Amino acid sequence: MKNWILLAAVVALSSCGDYGKVLKNTDPAYRLERAIKYYEGGNYSKAFPLFDELMTSYRGTTKAQEVYRYFAKTLYAQRDYILASYHFKRFAQTFPSDEYAEDAAYLGAYCAYLEAPSITLDPAYTYQAMDELQLFINTHPNSKFLSEANDHIDELRGRLEEKSYLIAKGYHHRNQYSSAVVSFNVMLTEHPSSPRREQAMFFRLESAVRYAQNSIDAKKAERFKEAETYVKEYRSTFPGGTYAADVASLEKQITLNKQK
């Protein structure tokens, strides 16, 4: 067992010493060869500093594109998606005729997608990722990545729909019925094809009824009338829907309150 530990330590030290020699070597061709080997071996932490320095060494030469490609790919492999996105897009813009340009343009947008947060966080990156993917689709209408890009946009749109629904449902759950009605209206306007549409329309109605019931007398008639329009909208959109019985019950409450 001790022999194995000693062997591992020797290998580690040898490897460390070897990398030190690469860093000290001033021959760009040799450093590029070793950087590519490190990259292909999955040793991205060693490859990256070399590619970073070689970007300067090979600027303006025929090797510049290859070095820049590896530099961006190493960032991607290290999951530094914000910087990778920037450099992939810059590669595609700087070398539009390169055979890797389309891949780089897609990866620039894909990195933005990977950086987009879950539905519980600020959606700013989600909108940015959708814009990046749509720009790629617009500029590469015949791309081999077209289907993937559209799928990613659909997924991100679904995240935004779910976030919008959960915000409105949160107001409803906390009995903040006025805010719930407004939020459900926003959600239904911005995401008319959402799979949550029926649920949103029902909880909007329920929130509107509760809001009217809790209002001062001078405002009740107006607010019950608004709730009544939501009954009609639900039934016209989902005749015989999942919440039909609950809608009928809420309609009775509206009628009873209007008769007072």
Image (tube, rainbow, N blue to C red):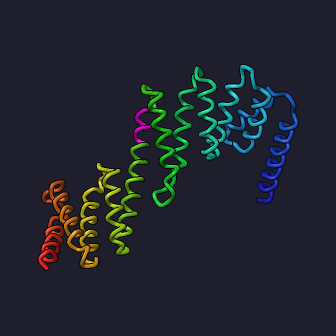
Q: Which quadrant of the structure image shows residue 180?
A: bottom left
Q: Position of residue 40 (x, y in %)?
A: 66, 36
Q: Position of residue 224 (x, y in %)?
A: 21, 70
Quadrant of the frame with the N terminus: bottom right
Looking at this view, is 66 or 204 the one in front?
204
Q: How many marks?
A: 0
Identify the residue shown where x is 27% and y is 66%. 203
Quadrant of the frame with the C terminus: bottom left
Looking at this view, is 154 or 33 the one in front?
154
| 227 on left or right of 26 | left
| 163 on left or right of 132 | left
Q: Position of residue 149 (x, y in %)?
A: 44, 37
Q: Using the image, determine if residue 43 lies above or below residue 223.
A: above
Which residue is situated farthest in the front direction here? 218
Q: Is residue 222 magenta?
A: no
Identify the residue shown where x is 34% and y is 70%. 172
Q: Which quadrant of the structure image shows residue 18?
A: top right
Q: Using the image, determine if residue 67 lies above or below residue 61.
A: below
| 190 on left or right of 42 | left
Task: Provide the residue span drawn in magenta.
Answer: 146-151
Q: Is residue 147 magenta?
A: yes
Identify the residue shown where x is 74% and y is 21%. 61
Q: Position of residue 160 (x, y in %)?
A: 41, 53
Looking at this view, is 110 or 40 the one in front?
110
Identify the residue shown where x is 72% and y is 40%. 48
The overriding secondary structure of the stretch rendered in magenta is helix
